[in-house]
Image (cartoon, rainbow, N blue to C red):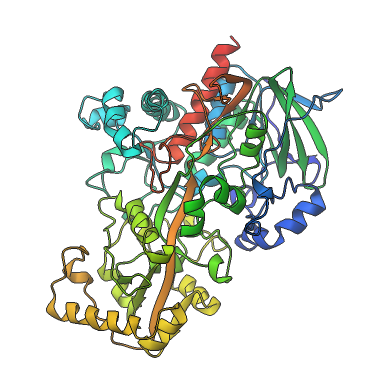
Amino acid sequence: MNKSKIVNNAEGRENQQPANPEDHSGMSRRGFLKGAAAGAAIASGAGLLTGGTMAFGETKQTESGVDLKGAKPIPPIAPPTKWDKEADVVIVGSGGGGLTGAVKAAEKGRSVIVIEKLQGPGGASKEAGLFFTGGGTRLQNAVKFALPAFPYNPDALVEMVSPWYQNTADKNLLRALAVKGPECVDWMEDCGVPWELNLENDKYFGPGVHIWKGSCKDGNYTRAMKPVTDHMYELAKKKGAEFIFMTSVIGLVEKNGRIVGVKTKNMKGKTLFIRAKQGVILAAGGFGVNRDMLEKYTPYANSRCGSSFAMPCDTGEVIRMGIGAGADLAGLGSVSCFDGGVDWVHENRGTFHQYLYNGSTQLARQPWLSVDITGERYQYLNSDPAPNLWNLSAIQMSRPGGRGFVVFDNDYETNIWKFKQTYCRKPLTPTMANASRVPAWLAPTDWRDGVKAALKAGVIKKANTIEELGKQLGFDAGVLSQSVEKWNEVCRTGKDNPVYQYQPEWLIPIRKPPFFGIRLGGFLYATACGLRVTPGMQVVNKRGKAIPGLYATFHVAGGQVGEQSVTGICFLADVGLSMTGGYIAAETIAKESA
């Protein structure tokens, strides 16, 4: 096996991994997120701007009514006269799917090159909290947990979830995920990942949740998967995989109808042709910050989401390359959303990408008085059970104008703790367990600091009267004042209308000025529209025929939650989907090339 290498193509030399893994695995908060503003300069200077899509920052939507340049297919290119590098398997992206694919392919004796446009590995997967399966793992069998019933039956699970997706998801694909998801978890445990079930924090879904041992103490799920991606990265290197960072794939290379490699370009403009002797795995994520692709393929979410947790690099180029190579799409209109997407970009006060655990987001996701633009209230869904974390987004997105509003008074710093929200609605504090896992450049560990920044930016409105607050938020005169009066009367009685499902401790009157309000939509965290794949993760064309040499894992692949779903969640959640897809793709390549 060849000795593993890390290549930093921005500098054009081989480097050892820095002692501080954060220096290698991500940009600073300032440098990482300012890509949204500086992405065009970076891209044009380094030659990374492809078809209107920024390499390191979200794309702004093309003016309405004109051709959506950032959604155009990118056709494949012809082979070079001479290849610069080659490997059996070339993987585009080093998130969860890229890492499991790299380890599994290397384990099968294949040489591997992984290409990543960020500074280091992990992608969106390192920001996730858990790997969910409906049963079938060793740990789950030990506690006799399975959905819909123990013992675990993949076919029963598929029949249970198919109606969730209006029966539009490919059952053969779902079954492959139901079989291989638990297998992937156990394999990762054999690879040294110390899984434990989340029995401490969740009485409903805890037995379904695999977390790195000790990573979710006191219900803090922030970046809980980062130890997993770090471990799999180190293991991939140990097994001989080569990683090339700060480098983008700018085209698939095709010969006689087969994808035989990729063309890359680094930050200094240097290009490389890399041959894939057995297959290319696309594992570069979705298009959650490409506004043109969102408008073309998921228009409802594009207009109704206030923010996106998708990585700033989730700009969808490789999906466009797959389409250019003739791939079909699955999951049109489908995304995964949380509630509480603060409306930064639509108010021209910030970027579409926002970090899920930012203080302003956590503040917006609490059960304050929730009304739409007409002043009518809408229901709030508690974070326990967990599905309400994404079901509430559908409610907020369905209101008139596609937006909801939360309103509260000056005692919010005290009152927020009365709601007892869990998972990713729980505000960060410096004293909570594993607080150091969130570096200062990523998000303040004191949620109040994020709120201060949002107040300064003007995305959280503040006024000394309710009438003035309503004016700032865009309500017609008198509408918000009347809503607050009705709310305060409900709080006085201590009994809410059951339609809204507010618990008694949530009935907190709005009396103490200054008053605050936030305009919000859905909080998009992943696109579920992508390249159509077989159960073996082979990309297929519009006739359902596999495109030779081309494979994809989620969320480059799509269709896992069917068509036209805005709150879709797969039974493997999102990081589990990615990791299982990479695992399957590497296995398929190994079988086909045996």
Assign the N terminus to one quadrant of the image.
top right
Q: Residue at x 55, y 58 (%)?
A: 353
The quadrant where residue 83 appears: top right
Q: Which residue is drawn at 37% across and 46% down?
A: 214
Q: Find the residue positioned furthest to the front.
A: 65
Answer with left or right where residue 548 lies relative to residue 44: left
Q: In this view, does 360 lie above or below 353?
A: below
Q: Where is residue 272 in the image (x, y as percent from the top left)?
A: 80, 33
Numbered-mark total = 0
The quadrant where residue 477 appears: bottom left
Q: Position of residue 283 (x, y in %)?
A: 58, 35
The quadrant where residue 316 appears: top right
Q: In this view, does 428 lie above or below 123?
A: below
Answer with left or right where residue 328 lies relative to residue 153: right
Q: Where is residue 288 in the image (x, y as percent from the top left)?
A: 54, 49
Answer with left or right where residue 219 lies relative to residue 143: right
Between 401 and 448, which is closer to the camera in this rendering? 401
Q: Residue at x 32, y 28 (%)?
A: 137
Between 94 and 14, which is closer to the camera in this rendering? 94
Assign the C terminus to one quadrant of the image.
top right
Q: Is residue 476 above or below residue 194?
A: below
Between 376 and 572, which is closer to the camera in this rendering? 376
Q: Which residue is drawn at 40% across and 32% down?
A: 169
Does residue 278 appear in this view? yes
Q: Find the residue positioned furthest to the top.
A: 594
Q: Where is residue 228 in the image (x, y as percent from the top left)?
A: 48, 40
Does residue 430 appear in this view? no
